[in-house]
Image (spheres, rainbow, N blue to C red):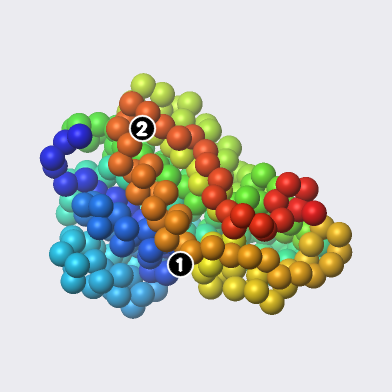
Amino acid sequence: MSDRTRVALVTGGGSGVGAVSAKALAAAGFAVVVCGRRKEPLQEVVGDIERSGGRAASFVTDVSDAAQVDSLFSAVRTEFGRLDVLFNNAGGRIPNAPIDEIDTDDWEKILAVNLTGPFLCTRAAVGLMRSQEPGGGRIISNGSVSAQVPRPHTAAYASSKSGLTGLMRATTLDTRGSGVCCTQIDIGNAATDMSARMDVGVLQADGSVRSEPRFDPQHVADLVVHIARLPLEVNIPSVTIMATDMPFAGRG
């Protein structure tokens, strides 16, 4: 393992899994860049990292905007010189609805954030990782158990996460031999604001509405750090982490 400081970029790094993971990566010795659409939460994460003795920077970025993503990666190259880990974490949801009631604007919105964003960041990261010296790096993407087993009335969200799986697998093929490793972490019910509705109750496959267990997102962050610290000669292509008793197989 090299003694040089390694650099990690976390998208959607101002809150939830992204914020916890950014702090965990910093605690593990990475210089951390966080990006997102809101300036204040990003600055709070940077402040927490710096007060703990780490190095961090933030950039306001909409990852679904190609020009903004290009500017972000140019800034990372200029300020840090390289990128060792990209955590494609930024994502969102739209209101659940039967497929024949999904608004096309909502469909395009969720694909832009959950699939186009990771594509743009992955494309830029691969270009940087291939050209830097030493070359290579890791691309870790925040998927969902919905990529494997959808919930009722989530065709748009499930499609975006299934598409992410295809993106990661195709990138793995396209970067073979270059030292770039891709991993998708499929997460089920990490306790963030996005999953708060699980406490109230969500629609189940049998038509009932029931609450579901959630788990501490620190466990996701610990997994991100474990993958990030692996030597590039070994990879974990996909892994699922979820609340033990949540509905999963068959969503029954």
How many callouts does the rendering have?
A: 2
Q: Position of residue 89 (x, y in %)?
A: 45, 56
The amino acid type, in three-letter code, at marker 2 is Val
Image quarter of the N terminus:
top left
The amino acid type, in three-letter code, at marker 1 is Gly
What residue appears at the point 34 percent right and 67 percent down from the top-left corner?
Answer: 60
Image quarter of the C terminus:
bottom right
- Residue placed under numbered mark 1 in the picture: 16
In the displayed structure image, the side of residue 5 where residue 68 appears, left or right = right
- Residue placed under numbered mark 2 in the picture: 180
Up the image or down, 170 lies above or below 16; here it is: above
Up the image or down, 76 lies above or below 3; here it is: below
Q: Position of residue 151 (x, y in %)?
A: 74, 56
Determine the residue located farthest toward the left in the rendered image: 3
Determine the residue located farthest toward the front in the rendered image: 245
Residue 71 seen in the current view: no
